[in-house]
């Protein structure tokens, strides 16, 4: 019987549900092997680094290896944000890094390995890589992954619901201590340039203030909101702030990324906001909490396990159809696919005039605008 090989990889930041996608691909491939051609699924360690490394780091994804992994966070294939083959970091003698395009080398290696298809599970950056490699002739399918929910070609990405649940659980705990001490509690969440995690957490947790990248805030309006809350005798305020939030006429809070990374590192806006509030005359005690990578870890929720599993099945079926250059998508409660080109065309910002934002305002949540 003819054996066909498929390569799976996970790139960028990790997200709860990645293992469920891997398992979904493998289980669907085994089902196909019963009635049709035999399929073998391999994984590349740390995204495309596993192919580019010498020796190569590729593992066979057997039934035993993927059994039960859908309940685990992270990814058994590991991941990296320092392996973009379009801008691959090469360390120089002096310790600095230069970025080199290694896509031609990567394409040649993958063709020599005789894979029937490649399934790239990743976010916006990873799918831009998918499109570039597809244009160079690779049979490639994408699966959307990001806790930030910032891919516009799909209604939801797996990992997002789990991140929101973790953030909401943490926020609930801060509400009680804020009330006990009559404090202003600021909780910083992830999301990069989009406010999806922050806003969903704010609504679920009952925050008084939510600051998101899409709506720059006026610090004086925030102070007035806080003062009004105290004057009414409630005596405490809870704020959710997205890591990419910024004041009007201000900039995001960031630092240079790690060596070999092409991305800036967001974080610290909770402390910046605290300082701004104090300088603007806020008299309340303020405490800051940064959730950080807690939002990426742990067991995925049932919803994310289901969505990720369906994505895995659909990705393999696109391979069966030889429908390459596509990304799996969740649209109108249906698992479908879109072209990779469409998938990376627009960033999924929260629209200030959206029903979600307007409803939050209807609930009394201030955005500082």
Image (tube, rainbow, N blue to C red):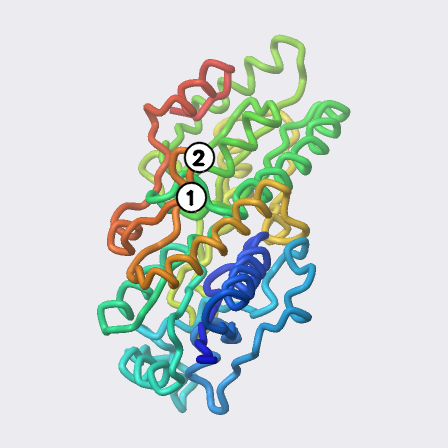
Q: Report x, y in % for residue 60.
A: 57, 77
Q: Report x, y in % for residue 347.
A: 31, 45
Mark 1: give few (<14), some (14-19) or many (20+) Cα within 10 Å. some
Question: Real-space Cα distance between discs 1 and 2?
Answer: 7 Å
Q: Quadrant of residue 182?
A: top right
Left or right, 214 with respect to 206, comes to left
Left or right, 333 with respect to 70, comes to left
Q: Nearer the viewer, residue 228 or 13?
A: 13
In what element is the residue under mark 1?
strand
Indicate whether 64 appears above or below 210.
below
Q: Residue at x 38, y 63 (%)?
A: 319
In this view, the residue farthest toward the left is: 135
Mark 2: give few (<14), some (14-19) or many (20+) Cα within 10 Å. few
Q: Is disc 1 in contact with disc 2, using a CB cutoff of under 8 Å?
A: no
Indicate whether 359 appears above or below 123.
above
Q: Residue at x 63, y 25 (%)?
A: 284
Q: Report x, y in % for residue 225.
A: 51, 18
Where is mark 1, residue-wise?
A: 335
Q: Nearer the viewer, residue 176 or 136?
A: 136
Indicate whether 327 appears above or below 183.
below
**Quarter placement of the C terminus:** top left
Q: Residue at x 62, y 38 (%)?
A: 165
In this view, the residue farthest toward the top is: 232
Where is mark 2, residue-wise?
A: 333
């Amino acid at each position: 019987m003819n054996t066909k090989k498929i390569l799976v990889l996970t790139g960028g930041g990790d997200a709860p549900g990645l293992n469920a996608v891997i398992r979904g691909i493998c289980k669907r491939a085994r089902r196909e092997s019963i009635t049709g051609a035999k399929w073998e699924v391999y994984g590349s360690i740390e995204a495309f680094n596993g192919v580019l490394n010498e020796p190569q780091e590729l593992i066979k994804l057997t039934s035993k290896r993927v059994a039960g992994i859908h309940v685990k966070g992270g990814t058994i294939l590991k991941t990296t944000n320092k392996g973009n083959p379009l801008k691959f970091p090469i360390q120089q003698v002096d310790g600095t890094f230069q970025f080199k395009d290694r896509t031609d080398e990567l394409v040649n290696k993958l063709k020599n390995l005789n894979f029937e298809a490649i399934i790239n599970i990743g976010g916006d950056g990873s799918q831009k890589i998918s499109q570039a490699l597809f244009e160079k002739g690779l049979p490639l399918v994408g699966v959307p992954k990001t806790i930030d929910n910032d891919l516009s070609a799909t209604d939801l990405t797996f990992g997002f619901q789990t991140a929101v649940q973790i953030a909401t659980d943490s926020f609930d705990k801060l509400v009680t201590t804020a009330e006990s001490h009559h404090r202003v509690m600021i909780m910083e969440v992830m999301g990069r340039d989009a406010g999806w995690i922050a806003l969903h957490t704010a609504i679920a947790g009952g925050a008084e203030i939510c600051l998101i990248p899409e709506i720059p805030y006026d610090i004086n309006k925030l102070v007035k909101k806080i003062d009004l809350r105290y004057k009414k005798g409630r005596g405490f305020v809870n704020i959710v702030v997205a890591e990419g939030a910024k004041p009007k006429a201000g900039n995001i809070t960031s630092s240079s990324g790690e060596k070999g990374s092409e991305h800036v590192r967001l974080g610290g806006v909770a402390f910046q906001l605290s300082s701004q509030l104090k300088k603007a005359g806020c008299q309340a005690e303020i405490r800051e909490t940064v959730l950080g990578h807690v939002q990426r870890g742990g067991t995925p929720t049932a919803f994310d396990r289901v969505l990720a599993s369906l994505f895995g099945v659909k990705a393999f079926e696109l391979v069966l159809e030889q429908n390459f250059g596509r990304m799996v998508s969740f649209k109108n409660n249906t698992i479908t696919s879109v072209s990779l080109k469409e998938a990376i065309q627009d960033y999924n910002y929260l629209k200030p005039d959206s029903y979600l934002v307007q409803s939050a305002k209807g609930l009394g949540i201030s955005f500082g605008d």
